[in-house]
Amino acid sequence: MNIILALAQSGQPGWLDEFLSALHKNLIVGDRWMQYLNGLSITLRISFFSLLFGTIIGVIVCFMRLSRFKVVRGIAITYIDILRGTPSMVQLMIIFYVILSPMRINREISAIVAFAINSSAYISELFRAGILAVDHGQTEAGRSLGMSGFKTSFFVVVPQAIKNCFPSYINEVSTLIKETAIVGYIAINDITKIADTIRSRTYEAFFPLIITAIIYYIIVKTVASLLSVLERRMRKSDKR
């Protein structure tokens, strides 16, 4: 960090001097780089737990959607329809300011609840599409081997369904991480909120926003790459 300050004071050409000075102002002054790291940790926590609980809820809703009982199926369809038909920002604000406000629940937990519920609607449909893509003959083969309906679903259908929907699941993970940028609306100091705060203090929008964009790009690219490696390994197991 001191290198930036030294270069900025070393009499570089005008544009370079201005660039280094702006970089110093937006990263070094007031330990603002630490603020970015704190914002990053909040973004990662919200993204991780939202994805974890969103996946669990999504799987449950998926099986409700596939239920033979009309009432259960109707509840799942209504749940999915409402969540997919309304903005995630509005859902976040309703959950924090209306539903969870009387309980005085932590803002970060409220954000996790909101994004987990929102994401579950999309994940449930992804998983349902994966299940429906499995050939019906697979189920018949399992039953012919004496497996119960539950065992056939769990050991035969579900593993294939996961492989079918995994590429779309990776896209949903990337979307979820980027959507967490709206948590500043309930005063959570994530990366985007930190960038906006620094912008208001330095009166410079370029560096805070570009730094934020780069951080998001690195996060999304890293997570997507790791999940793609997992997907390729899953595909390879089919060829053995």
Image (cartoon, rainbow, N blue to C red):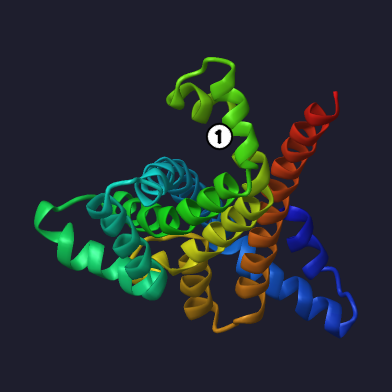
Q: Quadrant of the C terminus?
A: top right
Say what amino acid the circle numbered 1 marks.
Answer: Val
Q: Is residue 186 visible?
A: no
Q: Residue furthest right?
A: 13
Q: Is residue 176 above or below residue 232?
A: below
Q: Is residue 12 above or below residue 215?
A: below
Q: Residue furthest left?
A: 102
Place of residue 58 in the rendered image (x, y in percent of width and height, measured from the top left): 42, 48
Residue drawn at x 32%, y 69% as measured from the top left: 82
From the image, tell me which residue sits under label 1: 158
Residue drawn at x 62%, y 66% as measured from the top left: 212
Residue drawn at x 66%, y 45% as measured from the top left: 164
Q: Residues within 10 Å of mark 1 (few under 14, many from 20)?
A: some
Q: Is residue 239 above or below residue 113?
A: above
Q: Nearer the viewer, residue 77 or 221?
A: 77
Q: In the image, 58: left or right of 70?
A: right
Q: Residue furthest top?
A: 146
Place of residue 185 in the rendered image (x, y in percent of width and height, measured from the top left): 35, 71
Residue drawn at x 57%, y 62% as measured from the top left: 175
**Image-quadrant location for residue 67:** top left
Q: In the image, 91: left or right of 217?
A: left
Place of residue 119 in the rendered image (x, y in percent of width and height, measured from the top left): 44, 56
Q: Nearer the viewer, residue 213 or 135?
A: 135
Secondary structure under tag 1 reads helix
Q: Is residue 112 visible?
A: yes
Q: Nearer the viewer, residue 97 or 123?
A: 123
In this rendering, the count of numbered labels is 1
